[in-house]
Amino acid sequence: MKLIELIIMAWRTIVSSPMRTFLTMLGVIIGVGSVITLVSIGRGTTAEIEKQYEGLGANLLVVNVMGNGRATQLDYEELMNLEKLPEFARIAPTITQASSNIKYDRTQEEYTVVGTNDRYIGMMKAELNSGRFLAQADLDFRNHVVVLGSTVAETFFGKYDPVGETINISGYIYTVIGKLKVQGSTLSGTSVDDSVFVPLETARRDFKLGSIRTTYVEASSAEDTTVAESTMNKYLTYKFTSSSGYTITNQDQLKEARKEASSTLNNQLISIAAISLLVGGIGIMNIMMVTVSERTREIGVRKSIGAKRRNILFQFLVEAVVISGLGGLIGLLLGTLLAYVWPFIYPDQTTQISLDVGLYAFGFSAMVGVIFGLYPANQASKLRPIDALRTD
């Protein structure tokens, strides 16, 4: 019997019991759809990390200080004096207070307050939507001025320009001098969108914040990054007498760490999705065993008029592959559709749909049909005609 005839026979069997066929394919549909969607999200995340990396540049260092007490405190003036060295372009020390209470009119929410200097906006490649960013005069005179991230501004002012308005931050009145454009999260995991920015010394005084914990350092060029990192190491080792009180991370390390974490998470999710394919395969095997039992007399009739064992084997094997392949095709379409609409559901996430992943997933679903359909098909082919014909 030709392959096309076997496929037609399999199709007739499938459409004769559409609900049972759909339930049989459901595990394969979910498995393939999940793999397509998750891989698309994972590749989109990786591409976004690459984009962020290129945007921030390869010459940015992030210094984090651990521990408490005066022995682990950084001095703002000392840090800024390092800018005089040729390997440094800009330095932006920061102090942070998470979940600060911010009020405007009748609206009250909690956002992160970042105390920093005028260099920060350029180093983070943030852009102003209106107004201005912090200036050196704001730091010198400890002005009560604030720049709002896009999310914060929208929460309190909607589409209205907040420049010139006053807000209450943890009991202190600040005048809004600027609003930032939407940026999204950076490689360091921070987000200017969900933060407000005030002069560093003003934040230290008002919110009783201690020492500088995070400092962003921009080397003069990508080639000077190694020299800048070495200089910072020498300064911090001298300051703390050891290297255990701080870490210096460059953009390559941040990039690889984020990519590795993203890859690990996606691999785990794909493994979970693959379980659906396994469950779907078991479902196919179960239904095929039932089908063999229901069609025992048909098998006996076919064998009695000359059908060989391989004919019966291929008949039921093709039927299993058609079921799993059809489920894989539906899963492929649904997964691609979901990957396409995902950014509309979650605007801060991107996806990257790849043809090769779809082909691999579809091929794997067909292989599931072969693997799990082989045993029922083999059992059917082994039936003796006389025993099959006696079955009611």
Image: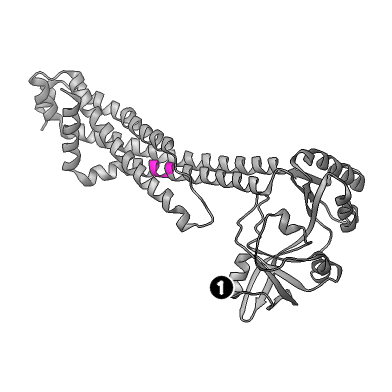
Say which residue label 1 marks.
159
Give the prevailing secondary structure in the magenta stretch.
Answer: helix
Magenta extent: 31-36
Q: Residue at x 22, y 24 (%)?
A: 314
* Residue 34 appears left or right of 304: right
Q: What SS does tag 1 mark?
A: loop
Give the answer, above or below, for where 2 lies relative to 129. above
Quadrant in which residue 348 is drawn: bottom right
Report the residue at 68% width, 44% height from top.
Answer: 254
**Mark 1, other Cα within 10 Å: few <14 / some 14–19 / many ≥20:** few
Name the image quarter holding the N terminus: top left
Assess whether residue 32 is covered by the magenta stretch.
yes
Is 194 part of what is drawn in magenta? no
In-image side of 269 versus 362 (left or right)? right
**Residue drawn at (78%, 74%), measured in percent from left and top?**
144
Residue lying at the far left in this picture: please name it: 305
Amino acid carrying label 1: it is Lys
x%, y% of residue 326? Answer: 28, 39
Residue 14 pos. (x, y %): 20, 39
Which residue is pictured at 62% across the width and 54% down the height?
A: 185
Whole-percent x, y for residue 320 in the image: 26, 32
Q: Quadrant of the C terminus?
A: top left
